[in-house]
Image: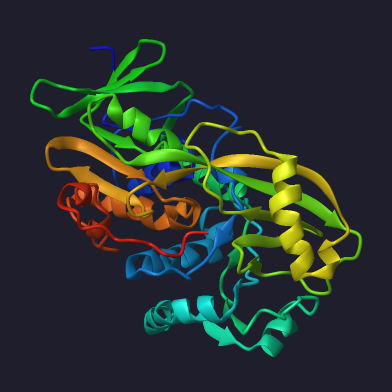
Amino acid sequence: MGNTCDLIIAGGGVMASSIAYNLLKDGYTGRIVLFEQDPVYEYASTPRSAGGIRQIFSTELNIRMSQYGLQIFKKFAEDMAINGEPAEIDFKQRGYLFLANERILTGMQAQIALQQRLGVNVEVRTVEETLALIPELNVSDLVGSVFSPEDGYLDPYSVMQGYIKQAKHLGAEYIHEQVAAFLRDVTGTIAGVRLATGETWHAKVVVNACGAWSGDLSKTMGVDLPVVPLRRQIFHFDLAKPLKNPLPLTVDVSGVYFRHEGPKIIAGLSNTVPYEYNFQWEKPFFENEIWPVLAKRCPNFETLKLERGWAGLYDFNLVDQNGIIGGYSDIPGYYVATGFSGHGLQHAPAAGKALSELIRLGHYETLDVRALSPERFKTGQYILEEGIV
């Protein structure tokens, strides 16, 4: 029979570790083993992200998940401390700022109304009010902006490590081996995993939380999970003339986003590229696609020194760009938490709590995320998220 435990999680990053942490914190007493193929998390998606936390989404469920996550992150350092050592995540609530022309502002009106109805502190700012935040902006093509002052950005690596350390502290076991396949018994019930080494591990509950790799791994037992790896690049640079004010995470009308990283700046662009496991960053992409936009938007960006860049992977949901959370009615014991399409870090607290409740109790209590079940791909009841950055 090989090795046996009560619950296996494929993946060991922020999503997987949030699930393990929430299960153990909520009273789960079984043995939890997480399999993470990257022992130093060199290619993990979370540390390679921009670390943004926002409530500006187009669907009620994503807004509520962000609201839950925001409250967790505000108290993260204290609540996730171990032996009195705070789990600092450098959370800077400098806000999210969406620059808007007439088309964008008109298109966001319904979203803003929904966000405000749900209690999100979000406001439409005039051009003058926008300049109060970033005085150096070129606003000639803008009619204003949309600003959520409680949002912001943090150190994603520290969040991931905070969850990992707490999960281990509570008893979760991390094994740095690659899961090669999921196993089912003759009845179709989940039975465990086979590692790349050939070793098998058995459990009655298996969670697929390995991000961009989750779709391919799900195929090993004949289940189509519409998640693919989508590369996103981020660039880190210094300005010859610093900006006057600390930046909110700012999203330009072009889709280029930028924020401070200490005294320097990081920037990126949501672009569609071939779906592949590609971690190469490309200086020409910055020079041709991002820098011209930045320089046009703000004269301080005309003279800069590009210092480095990196690429990471979205676990991109091809169907509706929303997270996939839950189980399968025809595969007892198999659960997924993936497909967040770039908002996995900010929704990891809510997703971890939700799966903890579903696995332990059989239903949701804190947040009802049934609409994100993988079963929706059978029924066609999709929830399209328009706010992908």
Q: In front here: 300 or 18?
A: 300
Residue 139 percent coordinates (x, y):
72, 80
Q: Residue at x 65, y 66 (%)?
A: 92
Residue 348 percent coordinates (x, y):
43, 52
Left or right: 276 in relation to 353: right
Q: Residue at x 76, y 56 (%)?
A: 291
Which quarter of the figure has residue 222?
top left
Left or right: 242 in relation to 197: right
Q: Residue furthest left?
A: 187
Q: Residue at x 50, y 38 (%)?
A: 274
Residue 153 vertical placement versus 16 (above, below): below
Residue 78 can be seen in this image:
no
Residue 131 percent coordinates (x, y):
73, 83
Quadrant containing the N terminus is: top left
Q: In front here: 122 or 73?
A: 122
Residue 363 vertical placement versus 15 (above, below): below
Residue 105 vertical placement versus 128 (above, below): above
